[in-house]
Amino acid sequence: MTPPSVLNLNAYLMYATGKAARRRLTDALTAHGLRLRHLTVLAMLEDTAPLSKGDLASRLDMNQSDLTRTVTDLERAEHVTCTRDPSDRRRIEVALTAAGRGALARLDHEVSATEADLLSPLTREERDRFTSLLRRVHTHLEQVREDPPTH
């Protein structure tokens, strides 16, 4: 049992809860041959036009080598295509394929079921509020990352 003094640390609660959520989501995704990083890239590409590997890494706050490995996995599974930008041959554009969209649709149920299980102690209203608060903190952290405060 976690002692009360540790439970008073929000940083610990975020870390421990995130770790447990990641583990459960990873278990659900592994059955489909994917990991959370694959799901994240597919979801980003679903909402955007083709993106360069550099843009994907930046938007997802992933290091370039992890992003490249993830895109290579997804390309082998035919979930994405990679093409050179004709105006800049150094730039590789990554786009979602129909198979990638299908994979996302199939994973939606798994992800939703996992999230519902993780948040089962909360009422519907509490889940909505929790999601709203998480998004607000996430947005703040993205803004700080892009424009760090000067002290």
Image (spheres, rainbow, N blue to C red):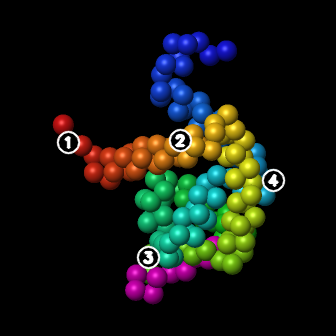
Q: Quadrant of the C terminus?
A: top left
| Mark number, residue 31 | 4
Asked whether the beta carbons under mark 4 and mark 1 sit within 8 Å of each other, the answer is: no
Q: CA distance from mark 2 to mark 4?
A: 28 Å
Q: Is residue 3 left or right of residue 84?
A: right
| Residue annotated with mark 2 | 130
Q: Which callout, 4 or 1, points at the residue further toward the start of the chain?
A: 4
Asked whether the beta carbons under mark 2 and mark 1 sit within 8 Å of each other, the answer is: no
Q: Which residues are magenta?
A: 79-88
| Residue annotated with mark 3 | 90
Q: Position of residue 69 (x, y in %)?
A: 60, 59
Q: How busy is the neighbourhood of tag 1: few (under 14 within 10 Å), some, or many (20 plus)? A: few
Asked whether the beta carbons under mark 2 and mark 4 sit within 8 Å of each other, the answer is: no
Residue at 58% of width from left, 70% of height from top? Answer: 46
Q: Position of residue 19 (x, y in %)?
A: 62, 36
| Residue annotated with mark 1 | 150
* Residue 86 painted magenta: yes
Callout 3 amino acid: Arg
| Mark number, residue 29 | none
Tell which residue pokes out farthest to the left in this image: 151
Q: Which callout, 2 or 4, points at the residue further toward the start of the chain?
A: 4
The relative height of residue 48 versus residue 56 in the rendered view (above or below) is below
Of circles 3 and 2, the one toward us is 2
Tell which residue pokes out farthest to the right in this image: 31
Query: Could you say which is closer to the camera, residue 21 or residue 38?
Result: 21
Callout 4 amino acid: Ala
Determine which quarter of the picture holds residue 81: bottom right
Residue at 59% of width from left, 30% of height from top? Answer: 16
Callout 1 amino acid: Thr
Q: CA distance from mark 3 to mark 4?
A: 35 Å
